Image (cartoon, rainbow, N blue to C red):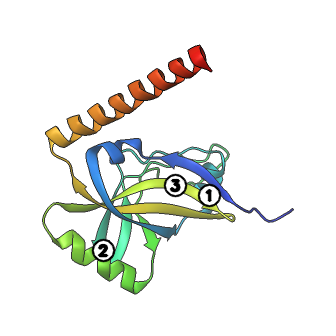
Amino acid sequence: MPKETGRKVIANNKKARHEYLIEDTVEAGLVLSGTEVKSLRHGRASLAEGYVVEYGGELWLENVHIPEYSQGTWTNHAARRRRKLLLHREQIDKLVVKVEQAGHTIVPLSLYFKDGRAKVEIALAKGKKLHDKRQTLRERQDRREAERAMSAHLKRHG
């Protein structure tokens, strides 16, 4: 069987980009059990309520839902178990220092396979205020309207 190459996205966390102001992103490996990997290969996972916490000098991914593998037996995993993130010590220390500052948190942005290995993109983020969320929505809406107007103009005069 040929070795997998490239990046295959399993799940994205759209809510995180809306709820938080993303300051820095880092790619981390994941410690997974066999049935979790098989479940991910079927493209099933949810990052919606996921977050990262620090325990004993290590970072852990919490509340990410990877459903049980349908052909699994007694070896099946718990769907929302705590999963260890694989990062270099300097990366962990840098993130922990930033999180200790008020208003910062670490959230997962996407879960994917990169060259056959499960990876998660995590982001150092700061919570947005309600008016910031409204501003983001307004900018997105304005950009869509401008694109519509330009495409309509090109169709008429194109």
**Which residue position is annotated with label 2?**
95
**Residue at point 20% right, 48% down?**
128
Q: Determine the CA span between mark 2 and mark 3.
A: 19 Å
Question: Sequence order check: which comes first, mark 2 or mark 1?
Answer: 1
Is the residue marked by circle 2 packed among few (<14), some (14-19), or many (20+) residues within 10 Å?
Answer: many
Q: Residues within 10 Å of mark 3 (few under 14, many from 20)?
A: many
To which quarter of the image does residue 135 belong? top left
What is the residue that sits farthest to the front in this orientation?
A: 157
The amino acid type, in three-letter code, at marker 1 is Val
* 158 shown above or below 83: above
Q: Is disc 2 placed on a helix, strand or loop?
A: helix
Q: x%, y% of residue 34?
A: 63, 62
SS of the residue at dot 3?
strand
- In the image, what residue occupies the spot 15% across and 45% down? 129
Q: Position of residue 39 (x, y in %)?
A: 61, 49
Disc assigned to residue 37: 1
Sooner in the amino-acid sequence: mark 2 or mark 3:
2
Q: Which mark is residue 111?
A: 3
Which amino acid lies under the numbered mark 2 shown in the image of this protein? Answer: Leu
Q: Is residue 42 visible?
A: yes
Lateral position of residue 157 relative to residue 100, left or right:
right
